[in-house]
Image (cartoon, rainbow, N blue to C red):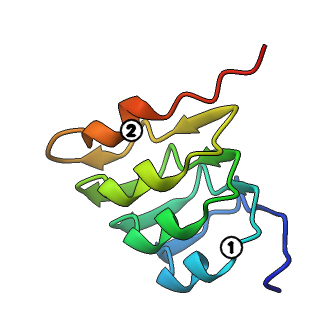
Amino acid sequence: MVSLKGISLALNHLSGLIPSSLGDLTSLKILYLFYNKLSGRIPIEVGNLKSLTDLELSLNRLSGSIPSSLANLSNLQHFVFLGANTFSGSIPQGLGRLDKTKE
């Protein structure tokens, strides 16, 4: 499963934590987990997904701070959606440097 390219589990009423082992899927390009009931923090291991082009975690029950490891996702091209959660703290500065605009 290391060569898996995309996961779309949106709109499935999933609950519980996002497993840190998700960070082992280093070939992953698309991760859609929006509109579920996921809770807890975004695992710092998500920052290991350096091939990721799309990240959609909005409309869950995620909390805590947004991990600064997300700044490692330098191949993000389309979007990062984290809205409609209950994050606390500030937005990591490194996220502002993620600019993969394609012309």
The residue tagged 1 is 26
Decide if residue 5 is on the left or right side of residue 95. Answer: right
For the residue pair 89 and 70, the one nearer the viewer reads as 70
Give the quarter of the image for residue 22: bottom right
Circle 2: is it few (<14), some (14-19), or many (20+) Cα within 10 Å? some
**Are the residues tagged 2 and 1 within 8 Å (C-beta)?**
no
Which residue shows up at 38% across the image and 70% down it?
Answer: 44
Q: How many marks overall?
A: 2
In the depicted structure, whether residue 10 falls above or below residue 53:
below
Horizontal side, residue 23 vs residue 31: left or right? left
Q: Residues within 10 Å of mark 1 (few under 14, many from 20)?
A: some
Residue at (62, 33) in percent of width and height: 79
Q: Does residue 87 lie above or below 13 as drawn?
A: above
Dot 2 or dot 1, earlier in sequence? 1
Where does the image place residue 70, in percent across and percent down from the top left? 43, 53
Element at badge 2?
A: helix
The amino acid pointed to by label 1 is: Thr
* Viewport quadrant of the C terminus: top right
Q: Looking at the image, is 1 positioned above or below residue 41? A: below
Q: Could you tell me residue 4's position as x and y percent?
A: 84, 74
Residue depicted at 75% across the width and 65% down the height = 28
Q: Residue 87, labelled with which disc?
A: none
Res 3 → quadrant: bottom right
C-alpha separation, residue under disc 2 versus residue under disc 1: 19 Å
Q: Secondary structure at mark 1?
A: loop
Q: Amino acid at mark 2?
A: Leu
Query: Percent x, y for residue 34?
Result: 60, 49
Q: Residue at x 26, y 37 (%)?
A: 93
Which residue extends farthest left?
89
* Residue at which label 2 appears: 95
Looking at the figure, which quarter contains the N terminus?
Answer: bottom right
Name the residue furthest top.
Answer: 103
